[in-house]
Image: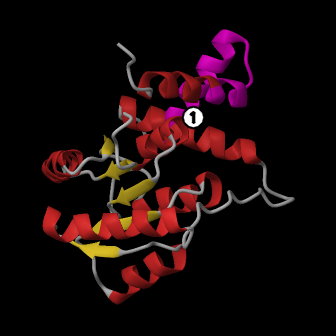
Amino acid sequence: MSTSKGRILLVDDDRLVLVTLSDGLRQAGYEVIDTDNGDDAILQARAQRPDLALLDIRMEGKSGFDVAAYLRDQGGVPFMFLSAFTDEATAQQARDLGALAHLGKPLDMERLLPEVERAFAKVRSGEIAAVAPRLPAANEDPRSQTVSIALGVLMHRHSLDRHQALERLRRLAQAEGRTVIAEAERVLEAVELLSLPKTI
């Protein structure tokens, strides 16, 4: 939307927190993409390119730390953590990942909005220009991440464990005459299409 102050990816497995913060951020003028798990968060980030991500840490599937590492290394999206875990080890891990902030729960809009506005001010001033995506290391196969994300999607959508999701992916690939990697890419493309905002 043209009047949006910025696009935020909000990820929290607590539906009440998700709805409350989403509504508050929208009322403050932000466009919000919300999801309740880390696997979908990565897909939404790939499809919709948020300006900032607000991440819960402990979630089913990929954790907030996993999502943050993806955003930092592949997407170049700044992020902050919203978590009930405020111990020093968790805070240090958040700092090591490059989080703009680590806010403890319970959290209300009076505490969250100033942090969000501060983050957007830093991005606009160039103080934290969007981080350049990390290039894969020479010995790292970027296709392995595609398969890993596709497995996460299948696990979440169909309540499967990792082994069952891999078997399902292999069966789909075999049925369509594709490689597992090609089928994984097809799964991600399909989910990305579904997650795009509707134009009507």
Q: Is residue 18 magenta?
A: no
Label 1: which secondary element: helix
Which residue corresponds to the image point at 53% horizontal and 73% vertical from the top-left?
97
Image location of residue 168, percent across then percent down: 54, 25
Left or right: residue 121 compared with residue 27: right
Amino acid carrying mark 1 in the image: Leu
Which is more toward the observer, 140 or 44?
Answer: 44
Left or right: residue 19 compared with residue 135: left
In this rendering, is residue 155 above or below 172? below
Residue that mark 1 sits on: 166
Which is more toward the observer, 164 or 25?
Answer: 25
Left or right: residue 38 compared with residue 70: left
Which residue corresponds to the image point at 47% horizontal and 70% vertical from the top-left?
122
Which residue corresponds to the image point at 28% horizontal and 53% vertical from the top-left?
12
Which residue corresponds to the image point at 74% horizontal and 47% vertical from the top-left?
142
Q: Which residues are magenta?
A: 162-185
